[in-house]
């Protein structure tokens, strides 16, 4: 078996800036055609005109069992990178290979529906994240116990507080037990006690050889669980190395 | 190292090796992949059914009320004032037999058009996006089956016998699903880019209703309009449907039927390719 868990080769992701398609009406598309038939037929293929490279030329390899932090300021492309690795969105160029089942913990509570009760949402959310019904059934009690929501599990989650919802969502996520875990800012959930519990669970994952990529602005957490860090800025990789070194240069840059 | 057996990673049936690269999804319809994600399809379909009638007091009763009340209205208006040739079938039965698939069709179109907008799913996890309209098409079958039961009761009441052709009914059902899904997947993607689609849809289906032999028979369509009339794939579906249910002769020529169903096949095939082309970046336009 290959020791490589994630291999990214020159990944780039381009976004259209300005108004998105979604906000445009059909009449505007027709307008464009009528006014600028040539431009509408040949939109600018590259360059900065109306596009933003959220990621550009990002290459790295992560070995099995490695714990890597992605650091960088807002808009550096960290979340987009995780979305590409979990196949939520395709890159515009480059390619990535992922060896192993991925647990995307990008925004907790994927598809939580307010009308459904806690139990139903656990099953639905688990399925979306790639768990089989059998797997969820086996883990169900553990998930509920972890969330400390035993008393409310038959209650529609529209009646939950936002903290309760987050706790339930995170409990499902940490019972995914994937080989590769991608975490985007998801550790900051619930009160202090719950956060400690979550961090302990993450530590267990790492101890069991799970590969982890983590986006966090909390350098204390980064320094605590990661050995390696990748620093992204404006979509480009600035530094890839020991967590202490990368954090030091990132902080120095931030301080300026 | 694996001291705690309970923590051993559970093998997921999902991809253990994935290649992420730009460009449209190939092949357009990856059946093995859809099969691997069957649990997600199950969950989506189940949720679709579960939340449809949440917080309603009549609940699943709506499934019966909708076609029954529409049939009453049609019978009083169209059945009384228009002489619809039904080959001896009571008009109400004729209308109901068309309404059941028609309501399924419009239901799938309406739900598909919004199935990817702000669901909170696209941007959070990967699964073949085709599962979303597919779950709509499968979830809608519940309504159709309930309406089918009502239809069976009506047929018994009017003492309308069935023939051996009833065996073709599952095939007709498949045609209906394929036609509805074919248009549904177009609407699902188009509505992401142009939300106008969802606004125009109720209005457009209302118009198409009058161009589809639900409340009337295809035999009433003047010859000069036939060429246009048969381009509507629902014409072929409804003709097959009544042919199988009542052992009734087709009201259109066999080659008309072929054109109508062929139009449905083209829409579905083109829709699948269009969907595959857009699928990799749907999360960028669709979700919050």
Image (cartoon, coloured by chain):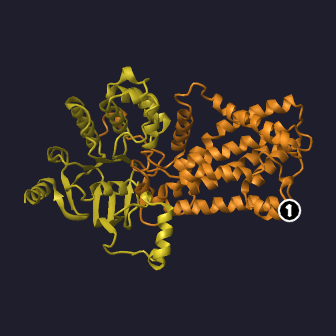
Chain colours: A yellow, B orange
Q: Label 1 belongs to which residue?
A: B223
Q: Is residue A199 left or right of residue A151?
A: left
Residue at 34% in and 69% down: A50
Q: Chain of mark 1?
A: B
Percent across and percent down for residue B25 are: 50, 62
Q: Is residue A244 left or right of residue A59?
A: left
- Judged from this view, the residue extending furthest toward the bottom is A38
Residue at 48% in and 67% down: A29
Classify B81 as above or below A43: above
Which of A89 and A31 lies nearest the eye of the viewer? A31
Q: Residues within 10 Å of mark 1 (few under 14, many from 20)?
A: few
Q: What is the quadrant of residue A56 in the picture? A: bottom left
Percent across and percent down for residue A16 are: 36, 65
Q: Is residue B138 left or right of residue A87?
A: right
Q: Report the quarter where the N terminus of chain B lies.
A: top left
Percent across and percent down for residue A8 are: 32, 63
């Amino acid at each position: 078996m290959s020791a490589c868990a994630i291999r990214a080769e020159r990944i780039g992701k381009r976004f259209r800036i300005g108004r998105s398609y979604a906000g445009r009406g059909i009449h505007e598309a027709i307008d464009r055609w009528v006014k600028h038939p040539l431009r509408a037929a040949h939109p600018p293929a590259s360059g900065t005109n109306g596009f933003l490279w959220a990621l550009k030329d990002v290459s790295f390899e992560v070995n099995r069992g490695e714990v890597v932090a992605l650091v960088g300021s807002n808009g550096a492309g960290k979340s987009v990178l995780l979305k590409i690795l979990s196949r939520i969105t395709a890159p515009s160029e480059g390619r990535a290979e992922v060896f192993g089942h991925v647990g995307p913990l990008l925004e907790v509570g994927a598809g939580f529906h307010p009308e459904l009760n806690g139990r139903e949402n656990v099953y639905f959310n688990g399925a979306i994240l790639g768990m089989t019904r059998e797997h969820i059934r086996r883990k169900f009690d553990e998930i509920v116990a972890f969330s400390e929501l035993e008393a409310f599990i038959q209650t529609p989650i529209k009646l939950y507080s936002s903290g309760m919802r987050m706790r339930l969502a995170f409990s499902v996520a940490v019972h995914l037990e994937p080989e590769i875990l991608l975490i985007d800012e998801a550790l900051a959930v619930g009160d202090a006690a719950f956060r400690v519990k979550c961090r302990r669970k993450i530590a267990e994952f790492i101890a069991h050889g799970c590969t982890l990529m983590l986006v966090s602005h909390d350098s204390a957490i980064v320094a605590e669980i990661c050995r390696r860090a990748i620093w992204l800025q404006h979509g480009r990789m600035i530094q890839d190395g020991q967590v202490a070194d990368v954090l030091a240069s990132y902080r120095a840059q931030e301080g300026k | 190292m694996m001291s705690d057996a309970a923590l051993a990673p559970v093998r997921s049936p999902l991809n253990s090796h994935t290649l992420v690269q730009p460009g449209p999804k190939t092949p357009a319809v990856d059946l093995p992949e859809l099969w691997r994600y069957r649990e997600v399809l199950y969950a989506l379909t189940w949720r679709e059914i579960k939340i449809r009638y949440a917080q309603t007091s009549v609940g699943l009763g709506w499934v019966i009320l909708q076609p029954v009340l529409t049939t009453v209205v049609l019978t009083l208006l169209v059945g009384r004032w228009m002489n619809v040739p039904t080959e001896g079938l009571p008009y109400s039965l004729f209308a109901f037999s068309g309404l059941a698939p028609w309501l399924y069709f419009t239901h799938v179109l309406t739900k598909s058009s919004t199935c990817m907008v702000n669901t909170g799913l696209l941007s959070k996890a990967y699964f073949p996006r085709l599962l979303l309209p597919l779950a709509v098409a499968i979830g809608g079958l519940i309504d159709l089956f309930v309406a089918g039961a009502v239809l069976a009761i009506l047929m018994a009441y009017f003492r309308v016998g069935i023939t051996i052709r009833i065996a073709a009914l599952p095939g007709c059902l498949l045609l209906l699903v394929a036609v509805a899904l074919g248009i549904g997947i177009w609407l699902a993607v188009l509505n992401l880019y142009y939300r106008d689609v969802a606004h125009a849809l109720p209005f457009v289906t209302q118009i198409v209703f009058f161009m589809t032999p639900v409340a009337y028979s295809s035999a009433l369509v003047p010859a000069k309009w036939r060429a246009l009339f048969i381009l509507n794939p629902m014409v072929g579906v409804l003709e097959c449907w009544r042919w199988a249910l009542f052992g009734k002769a087709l009201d259109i020529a066999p080659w008309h039927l072929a054109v109508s169903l062929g139009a449905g096949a083209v829409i579905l095939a083109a829709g699948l390719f269009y969907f595959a082309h857009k699928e990799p970046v749907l999360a960028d336009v669709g979700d919050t």
